[in-house]
Amino acid sequence: MTTTTRPGTPVATPARRLSAGTLALRQGRLEITQFLRSRESVVFTMGFPIIMIMIFAAIFRDEIAPGVSFTQYFVTGMIATGLMTVSFQNLGIWIPIERDRGVLKRYRGTPMPKWVWFAGKVILVVAIGLAETALLLAVSVALFDLDLPGTAARWLTFGWVSVLGITACTLCGIAISSLARTARSGSAVVTPVALVLQFISGVFFVFTNLPAWMQQVAALFPLKWMCQGLRAVFLPDSFGAHEPGGSFELGRVALVLALWCVIGLVLCLTTFRWTTKRDG
């Protein structure tokens, strides 16, 4: 668009600067669009928790405690692992691909603030995480009679456990992406870590049935505490006595997840690379 001070003398109108929030939202929309175009990622990320709970619900029909079915217990682990998949696993795999293709190098050369790129990733994780969790809960309620939280306090707990957990996993996913030397090695680095954490953190099995040493190792990482916090939301208060500490220990859950947010942020700031080693 141009304006004129006198006939025949065009004067360029200064370009309107976009606000920080608008830049972040546009980057987030771009990230979501790119994600949705990858059918494999969409099917795996959105469908994996649902497929797993349908399989386990068909196999295990007994109760693990009075009034607590295995499905009710298992859904808490699926919510936690779903949030970890969309954040830690997806970012740990896709960022090396973007780095290897030179996308990050080109982005760093633009006048766009670097934080906008990270904001776009966060928006992607939050949007897909919300959609995935809502879909999982809807299927669980419709097919497996899942009891949703009945009080505002439980929904509040669900909120802060999810926020702290997905924040920690997002930061750790960005950090671990620097370990992959090439695009192809991203999956090899991240997937085994994610699978091991799922098996030792009470996702596929009742946590207290695992060997003691395995429980101790799992307690060092955020997934175990995400699962435990979500059990406090979806299981009866009486089930807290079956936890290793004799209660759901929500204070410790918050402390450990917050600590991992700090650790993840430090790792991101000290290890993240915009280019591959061959690019310098």
Image (spheres, rainbow, N blue to C red):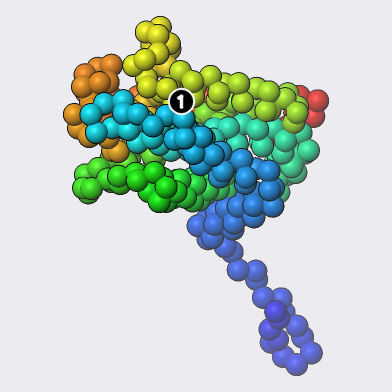
Across the whole image, how many numbered discs are drawn on residues?
1
Identify the residue at horizontal 80%, vertical 29% (top origin): 279
Residue at the far left: name it. Answer: 238
Which of the pair 210/215 is nearer the observer?
A: 210
Residue 165 appears in the picture as rendered: no
Residue at 60% over, 68% down: 16
Instruction: Report which quarter residue 224 is drawn in.
Output: top left
Q: Using the image as rendered, state which of residue 63 and residue 278 is in the foreground.
A: 63
In this view, which residue lies farthest toward the bottom? 7
Q: Position of residue 203 (x, y in %)?
A: 44, 27
- Amino acid type shown at disc 1: Phe
Secondary structure under the numbered disc 1 in the rendered image? loop
Q: Is residue 25 above or below residue 215?
A: below
Left or right: residue 108 versus residue 69 is right
Q: Is residue 12 above or below residue 144?
A: below
Q: Is residue 26 visible?
A: yes
Q: Which residue is mark 1?
A: 204
Question: Residue 7 placed where, x, y %?
Answer: 75, 93
Q: Quadrant of the C terminus?
A: top right
